[in-house]
Structures are given as C-alpha cells and as structure tokens.
Image (cartoon, coloured by chain):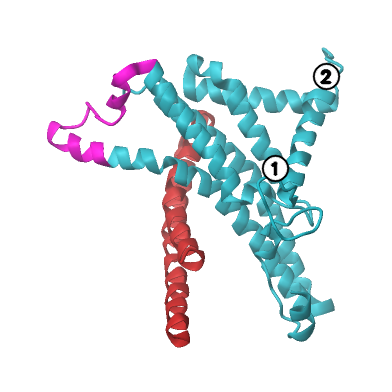
C-alpha cells in the first residue's frame, strides 16, 4: 500500500512539473504582445501612449492561459 | 522545522513557509474569528491607506503637500483609467474600483517588506475580490440591459454559422474570468516571493561568500517592486474592462 501511495505522489509531482512547461507558452505570448506593441510604437510614437492600456489588457489575457497550467500544477501537488 | 534545520545539511530551502497562516496569540486551532497574521497585515494595509488618504490630505491645501500630492496622483490615475475604459457611465462605480486598486496596491507593497506577510498571495483573498467583481458586474449587466445583456455572447458581427460556436467559447471565457482574475494576482505574488526565498536559501547555504545569490535577490526584488504595482494595475484595468462589458454589451 505504501509503495502504491508513493507511486501516485511521484506521478502527481512529475505531472506538476510537466504542467509548468505550459507557462513557457504564456511567456512566448506575452513577449509577442509587447514586441509587437514596441515595433508599432517605434513606427508611430505619437499613437503609443494611448495604447499602453490595451497592451496591458493583452498581456493579461495572454498570461491567463499560462496561469491555468500553474493552476493544474497546484492542483496536482496539493489537491489529492 | 527548527530541528530539521539543525539536523540537516546547510542547504535548507522552505520557500513556501512564508505563506503559512498562524494564529497571532499562540494555539493551533484556527476558526473564522481567530486573529492571524493575515488579519494583522490586512489591518496594517487599511491603516496605511487611511494614513495616506485621510491623514495625508487633512490640510486640503490648494498647493498640496508631498503626501497629499501622492494621494491626488493615485486618485487621478484611477479616475482617468475608469473614464478611458468604462466610459462616463462607469464613473458611477469609481469608488469601488478605487477601493479595490488601493487595497491591492498597498497589500502588495507591504508584502515586499522583509518578514512581512503578503495577504494577496492567498487565493482566498484574491478569489474573494474577484468573485465580488464577477457577481456585481453580472448583476449590473442584467439590471442595466435586461435580457439583451446576453448579446454579449451572441456576436452579431460574425458569420451566422460560426455564432453558436463563438457563443460557447464566449460563455466559457466569461465564467473563467474570476478564476484567471484571482489566480493571476495570487500566483504572481506567491511565485515572486518564493523565488526570493529560494535565492535566500542559496545565500544561506553558501555562507559568507554568497555574493552571486545576494545580487540575484536584489535583481529579483527590483523586478518584484515593478510587478506588484503592475499586478494591482492589471487587476483594476480588467475590472474596468468587465464593467465596460456590463454597461455596453454590444460588440
């Protein structure tokens, strides 16, 4: 029985680690949003200030999907 | 924990220990009325806000003092944010949004003090804030627009065949809002503080020669100082976006 419990916990922890790779996708997304904002802002600096809030909203939405992988990792580690 | 630290090697990292809720006056059992370190730091947060907004602006000077101008800058910043994103109708709900912003900002910044407790790192706290926003925005949408609030999910600019699929996606993303809203704030706070603690563990293991971990702690701390303000800003700006959806549901 004890071995079986250890095995389940090992699987859960490995899964938690694997789930965290999903955050890399969020990192790519956030970098893409900010990079495109910056390339647009350098072409037309006059319009840049008005779009900062939009950029942060875009970052927040891109980040939300990485947060789900973090949530899965947390659930695997603590909620069994 | 203390015996572990004595008996084990020098390499002891417990990055999650800082988030443990402990009763203030000893004992083990925690009921809903027990004063804990979370209660203490929320109280300190409220006192700091009162100190800035009530005590700091007591002069009501036309030429503001330093503390009064800080309070005025924060007020004006949030006021403009609500007006830009939710429109003129959104200004009626400005007091609530300002309360949310300044509470999160102060809780985050106070959490950066060494040995302090970050109340916003707990999903219980951020979840309560996010669910309050979600429920009030949903009720507001139905009160203001009636059944036509549901047109938020029925995108009339899309081709007719795509609309049911888009409606399902929109409904899922609507109900996921409080989850991502709360975990974004709580997760960022928790992860940042845990990273600082991990580097502090390296510094403890290396002893006196720990130059690299201390420089790393300084760098992460600088990043965290930025992140705490940005996360308060992001939480507020998303509240404004959701409010705007409730007030003007037509795409």
Q: Nearer the viewer, mark 2 or mark 1?
A: 1
Q: Colour of chain B?
A: cyan
Query: What kind of element bears circle 2?
Result: loop
Q: At x 39% / y 44%, what residue is drawn?
A: B176
Chain painted in red in the figure: A
3D distance between C-alphas at marks 2 and 1: 25 Å
Residues shaded magenta? B144-168
- Which residue is depicted at the point 74% across and 50% down? B36
For the residue pair B246 and B233, the one nearer the viewer reads as B246
Mark 2 in CB contact with mark 1 (< 8 angstroms) = no
Q: Circle 2: is it few (<14), some (14-19), or many (20+) Cα within 10 Å?
A: some
Quadrant for the C terminus of chain B, please.
Answer: top left
Q: Is residue B232 above or below residue B112?
A: above
Task: Please state the horizontal and vertical placement of residue A51, each as a whole percent of the image.
Answer: 49, 32
Q: How far from the left and from the top, in percent, is residue A6?
A: 47, 82
> Mark 2 or mark 1, which has the lower sequence index?
2
> Which chain does tag 2 point to?
B
């Amino acid at each position: 029985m004890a071995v079986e419990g250890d095995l389940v916990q090992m699987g859960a922890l490995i899964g938690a680690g694997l789930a965290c790779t999903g955050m890399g996708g969020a990192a790519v997304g956030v970098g893409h949003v900010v990079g495109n904002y910056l390339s647009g802002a350098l072409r037309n600096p006059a319009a840049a200030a008005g779009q900062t809030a939009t950029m942060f909203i875009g970052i927040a939405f891109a980040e939300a999907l990485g947060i789900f992988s973090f949530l899965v990792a947390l659930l695997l580690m603590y909620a069994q | 924990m203390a015996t572990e630290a004595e008996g084990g090697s020098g390499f002891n990292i417990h990055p999650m220990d800082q988030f443990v809720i402990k009763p203030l006056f000893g004992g083990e059992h925690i009921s809903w009325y027990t004063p804990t370190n979370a209660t203490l730091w929320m109280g300190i947060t409220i006192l700091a806000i009162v100190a800035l907004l009530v005590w700091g602006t007591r002069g009501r000077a036309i030429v503001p003092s330093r503390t009064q101008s800080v309070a005025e800058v924060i007020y004006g910043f949030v006021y403009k944010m609500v007006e830009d994103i939710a429109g003129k109708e959104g200004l009626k709900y400005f007091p609530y949004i300002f309360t949310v912003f300044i509470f999160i900002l102060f809780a985050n910044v106070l959490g950066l003090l060494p040995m302090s407790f970050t109340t916003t790192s707990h999903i219980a706290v951020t979840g309560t804030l996010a669910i309050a926003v979600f429920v009030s925005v949903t009720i507001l949408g139905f009160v203001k627009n009636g059944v036509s609030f549901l047109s938020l999910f029925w995108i009339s600019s899309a081709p007719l065949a795509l609309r049911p699929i888009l409606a399902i996606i929109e409904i899922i993303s609507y109900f996921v809002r409080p989850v991502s809203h709360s975990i974004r704030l709580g997760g960022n706070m928790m992860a940042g503080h845990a990273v600082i603690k991990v580097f502090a563990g390296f510094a403890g293991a290396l002893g006196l020669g720990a130059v690299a971990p201390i420089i790393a702690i300084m760098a992460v701390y600088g990043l965290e100082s930025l992140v705490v303000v940005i996360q308060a800003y992001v939480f507020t700006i998303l509240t404004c976006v959701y409010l705007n959806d409730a007030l003007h549901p037509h795409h």
